[in-house]
Image: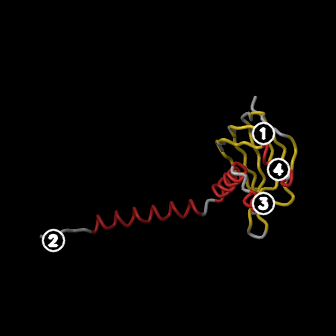
Amino acid sequence: MKKNYLPLITIALLAVASIAIAQAKTKSNPDKMIVEKSRATWEAYKNRNVGAMKALTADDYRSYSQTGPSNLKDDIATLAKLNIESYSIDDPKVSWVTKDVAILRYKCNLKGSYDGKPYAPVYATEVWVNRGGKWQIVSYQETLIS
């Protein structure tokens, strides 16, 4: 009795190809890359990792947050006042200005405090720029959710 394995082999090959395509799309998804860069920045601040903060943040970075305006030097100088327990990047949306400039907008439910004052949920906007193959944040702005 001769069995025909061709349909089974075809289905298996299609399944493997579908998985490979899905993984390639995830790796090459520029929107996801920007969100992951943002998450890495949050983790750097949360863990007070100055090296990672410097690697992810451009020299001309400026921030306007619940604690007021700052730059990277200010942020590093005030790390002792910073307590991030948790954060979220909810409903992220990425807009591409050019192939090297992306704007990320999301809702952030930030838990923790700055200088003993608790954070409140915000809408956040980040501008990311690719300079010489290195993506860095150049602007961060928060709007309180009332």
* Secondary structure beneath label 4: helix
Q: Name the residue under label 4.
A: 75
- Residue in front for this viewpoint, 118 or 139: 118
The numbered mark at residue 54 is: 3
Q: Mark 2 points at which residue?
A: 2
Question: Mark 2 or mark 3, which has the lower sequence index?
Answer: 2
Q: Which marked residue is nearer to the observer: mark 1 or mark 2? A: 1
Which colour style is shown? secondary structure
Question: Mark 4 or mark 3, which has the lower sequence index?
Answer: 3
Classed neighbour count for the residue bearing mark 2: other residues with Cα under 10 Å, few (<14), some (14–19), many (≥20): few
In x, y percent, where is residue 76? 81, 53
Question: Mark 2 or mark 4, which has the lower sequence index?
Answer: 2
Q: Which marked residue is nearer to the observer: mark 1 or mark 3? A: 1
Classed neighbour count for the residue bearing mark 4: other residues with Cα under 10 Å, few (<14), some (14–19), many (≥20): some
Question: Mark 1 or mark 2, which has the lower sequence index?
Answer: 2
Q: Which marked residue is nearer to the observer: mark 2 or mark 4? A: 4
The reply, left or right, for residue 76 in relation to residue 93 is: right
Q: Does residue 43 sit above or below 108 in this rendering?
A: below
Q: Name the residue under label 1.
A: 114
Considering the image in quadrants, where does the C terminus appear? top right
Question: Mark 1 or mark 3, which has the lower sequence index?
Answer: 3
In x, y percent, where is residue 128? 76, 56
**Distance between mark 1 and mark 4 Cα atoms:** 11 Å
At label 4, the amino acid type is: Asp
In x, y percent, where is residue 40? 67, 55
Question: Mark 1 or mark 4, which has the lower sequence index?
Answer: 4
Q: Residue at 39% across / 62% down in the picture?
A: 15
